[in-house]
Amino acid sequence: MIISTLFIIFISLLFIPLTYYTLRLLFSQKDYHNYIKDNLFESENMWYWKWKEDDVDMLHSKCSKCDTILHYDENKINNMVFYFCPKCNSQEMKMKGCTYSYSQFLLKREIKRKYFEGKYTKKL
Ligand SMILES: [Zn+2]
């Protein structure tokens, strides 16, 4: 009788860490991975992205009229990036003071800043 009680306690103690690590693995999906769109820098259009590990990937914006992914053109003399819709041929937005690669860097940094500071709304 004593042996069986000790055995049950031993087995229970064995399963506590196992259960803990299993649950931790199951629920360890990072919260910010649901953060996949936002109106960054109060831009006219919404920005969308995916998470690749802890990095922002496939950052893009869509046309407000037809939902097509926007293309970009940059004016390196005036340091401006224009985002336009190839289908509607309308300019959707522009970013001043940067090239395309720098604008992507700024947007990704803003996304990471928002999730580090918890200043984003979860979108499922
Ligand atoms: Zn369009």
Image: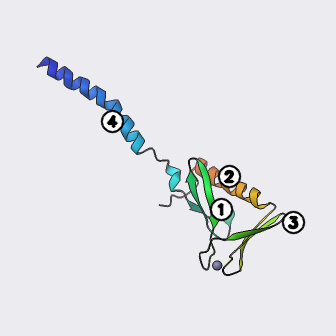
Are dots 3 and 1 in contact, CB under 8 Å? no
Three-letter code for the amino acid on which mark 2 is drawn = Arg
Viewer-closest of 84 and 20:
84
Question: To which residue does mark 1 refer?
Answer: 40
Are dots 3 and 2 in contact, CB under 8 Å? no
Three-letter code for the amino acid on which mark 4 is drawn = Thr
State how the image is colored.
rainbow
Q: Earlier in the sequence, mark 4 or mark 2?
A: 4
Does label 1 point to a residue whose CB lies under 8 Å from ligand 1? Answer: no
Viewer-closest of 111 and 51:
51
Q: Residues within 10 Å of mark 4 (few under 14, many from 20)?
A: few
How far, Cα to Cα, is label 4 from label 2? 37 Å
How far, Cα to Cα, is label 4 from label 1? 40 Å
Question: To which residue does mark 2 refer?
Answer: 109
How far, Cα to Cα, is label 4 from label 3? 59 Å
Are dots 4 and 2 in contact, CB under 8 Å? no
Three-letter code for the amino acid on which mark 1 is drawn = Leu
